[in-house]
Amino acid sequence: MKVVIVGNSAAAVGVVEAMRAQDQRAQIMMISEEPHPIYSRPLLDHYLAAKIPRARLAYRSADFYTRHDVTPLLETRVVALDTAARCVTTADGRSIDYERLVICTGGAPIVPPVDGREAQGVFTFARLGDIEGIDRLIASQQVHSAVVVGAGMIGIKATDALSRRGIRVTMLELAPRILSAALDDAASAILAARLQSAGVDVRTGNTVTAINSTHGRVSSVTLQDGGELAAQLVVFGIGVRPNVALVSGTDIAVNRGIIVDRTMRTTVSDIYAAGDVAEAYDLVVDMNRIVAIWPNAYRQGAIAGAQIVGLDAHDRGGVAMNAIEVQGLAAMAIGSANAEGAEYEVLCEGDPVAERYKRLVLQDGRLVGAILVGQINRAGVYTGLIRTRMDVSAYRKQLMGDGFGLLSLPEHYRKHIVTGQGIEV
Amino acid sequence: MKRIVIHEEHCIGCRLCEVYCLVAHSTSRDIIKAFKTERKTVMPRVLVEEDGPISFALQCRQCQDPSCLEACISGAMHRDERTGAIICDESRCVGCWMCIMVCPVGAIQQNLLGTQVASKCDLCYFADVPACVANCPNEGLTYEVIDEEARL
C-alpha cells in the first residue's frame, strides 16, 4: 500500500504513528512545503519568548522518519490532485501516485487587505519561518514598539512573547474584548488586566487601516479611530483559513474545510483529511465544523491512519478547547464556554482581584462549556463531563465548589471513569 | 500491562500514598530529606480525594487511548515502551496544561514548584512496584496485570 500524506504536523504524525502501530509494510511519504523536520507550531511563541531553545521545538525526535520508515519530501509544495488517476503533482513538476491520500494541509493565516502590508516588518504568526523573521528583526535591535492585530489565541501568544522580549506591544482587537471567541466579559477582563499590568497597551474596538513605511520598512500604523502608532513590527493574528486549494475542482466536498465523516474519509473514499483543514464532527454543537486545535488534529490523523491499516476506528467527535497563559496566568475555555442565551444555564463566580474565575454552562441539565481562570487543576474532569453528556443538574453546587473532583460526582460516574479499560474499583 | 487498581472501600484517607510517592520522586529518596529540604521542588503524583468516610487515592489510569498524549503540544507525553506507562518527560514539557484540560479523571497536576511542568504518575518505572501501592497499609491500591482483551 502506498500512502501519501500532505502535511508534516500533528495530524500527519497521528497518521504515521497509528499506521505503524499495526503495519510495517505500507510505504508512507510525507510531503511538506516547509524545510523543517516535524516541529510544534504551538511552541513557536515559547521559542520567540526565549522560554525554550530551538531544539525543543521538535515535536518528535529527529529519527522520526527513519524509525517509522517514512520518506519525507520537504520544501515541496503539492499543487494539484487528480482523484481519478490517484496522483498528486508537486510544484517542481513531479507526479506522485498514491493508493491512500491524507490531506493535512492545515490553515493559512489571514492577512487583511490593508494598504502597505507588503512592507518589511509585517508578519503573520503561524510558521517557524515567520518566527525566524521576527526574531531576526528583533535581534537587529530595530524593534522598540510592535503592533499585534487580533487578540485571539495567536494574537495573545504573539503579544505575550514579544513583551517578554522587552518590546512595547500594542494589541488591537476589533471586538469589544480580548479572546472574544473563547471567553466571556469577566474572564476576558481578568486576562486583559494582566496584560496591561505587564505593560501591554490593549485596545479593543480598533484595528489597523494602513501600514506606513519608511524606506520599505514599517514605521507606523494608522488606526481605524484615526490615530497613528509608531511601530517597527506588525504581527497579524486575526485568524486562519483552511488550506483547501488542493481539492478545489475535485469531487471532494468542501464547505469551509474539507468535509469528513467519523472515519476522516472525505467524499472520495480513498482520500482522508485531518487537522485544521478538516471539517469534522464536533460533539458539543452536534455538527461538523473546523476546530483548529492540536488534540483534534492528532486524533483525527490517528483515526485516518488506523482506518488505512484496516482498523474500525471512529471519531467520537471533537470538543473545541484551548488553554492559554497570559503573563503567567493560566486560563482555559472548553466547549461552548462563553455561550449565552435562554437555552443555557450559566453558573459563575470569580474574584478579579485574586485573578480567579469559573464559569460553567449547562444545557438541558448537561455541561456543555467551561471557562477557568487562575485555578485550572482538574479541568479535564469538566471536559470528561462534557464528552459523556451526563446529567449534572443535581450537582450544580458540587461543580462550582473549590474542592471539585471526582468525589463531587455520582458514584456510578466516578467508578465508571476510573474503571474503564480494565481498572476495577 | 500492569495497572494500579483503586479499592475505594479499603481506603482510609491516610495519605501515606502521597507521602511515599513524593519520596519516590525526590532526589534523595529519603523521607526526612524529601520533606525537609526538597519539598520546594517535589510533589506527590497521586491525589487522595476525601469526603467524610469516603476516600480514594487517584493517579493516572494509564488509558489505552490517552487524551493527554493526543493533546500534548511538546511531545513530552509519551508511552514508555517497557512498562506501558504514559510518562511526561519533564525536560520537554513546557507547562501548557493541555493535558490537564483533557484528562477525564483529573490525574495530572500543575507542578509550579520549579520549572513549570505537568506532574503525573509514571508507575514508578524505576521500581518493581509503585511506591503508593507498596506503602498502602490496607491494600487500598494494588498493582495487577489486567487482561485488557477479556474486558473489551
Image (spheres, coloured by chain):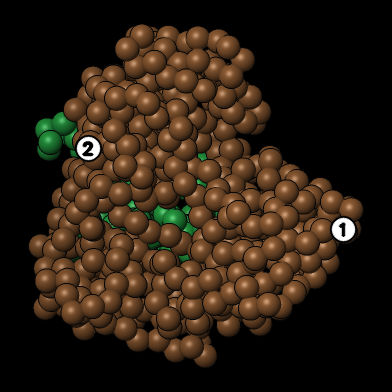
Chain colours: A brown, B green
Q: Residue A88, relative to residue A296: is it above or below? A: above
Please give the residue where the numbered disc 1 appears in the rendered image. Answer: A214
Question: Disc 2, disc 1: CB below 8 Å?
Answer: no
Q: Which mark is residue A234?
A: none
Q: Nearer the viewer, mark 2 or mark 1?
A: 1
In this rendered view, identify the residue nearer to me: A289 or A364. A289
Task: Determine the chain carrying the residue at label 1.
Answer: A
Q: Residue at x 42, y 49 (%)?
A: A292
Q: Residue A224, relative to residue B3: is it above or below? A: below
Secondary structure of the residue carrying numbered label 1: strand
Please give the residue where the numbered disc 2 appears in the rendered image. Answer: A262
Secondary structure of the residue carrying numbered label 2: loop
Residue B150, position in %: x, y? Answer: 11, 33
Q: Within 10 angstroms of label 2, few (less than 14), some, or many (20 or more) residues?
A: some
Task: Determine the chain carrying the residue at label 2.
Answer: A
Residue B105, position in %: x, y? Answer: 28, 59
Q: Residue at x 51, y 64 (%)?
A: A152
- The C terminus of chain A sits in image quarter: bottom left
N-terminal label among 2 and 1: 1
Question: Which residue type carries mark 2?
Answer: Arg
Give the CA separation, mark 2 to mark 1. 52 Å
Question: Which residue type carries mark 1?
Answer: Thr
Labels in figure, total: 2
Q: Residue at x 50, y 35 (%)?
A: A9
Residue B138, position in %: x, y? Answer: 23, 61
Residue A418 image-quadrant placement: bottom left
Q: Residue at x 22, y 63 (%)?
A: A385
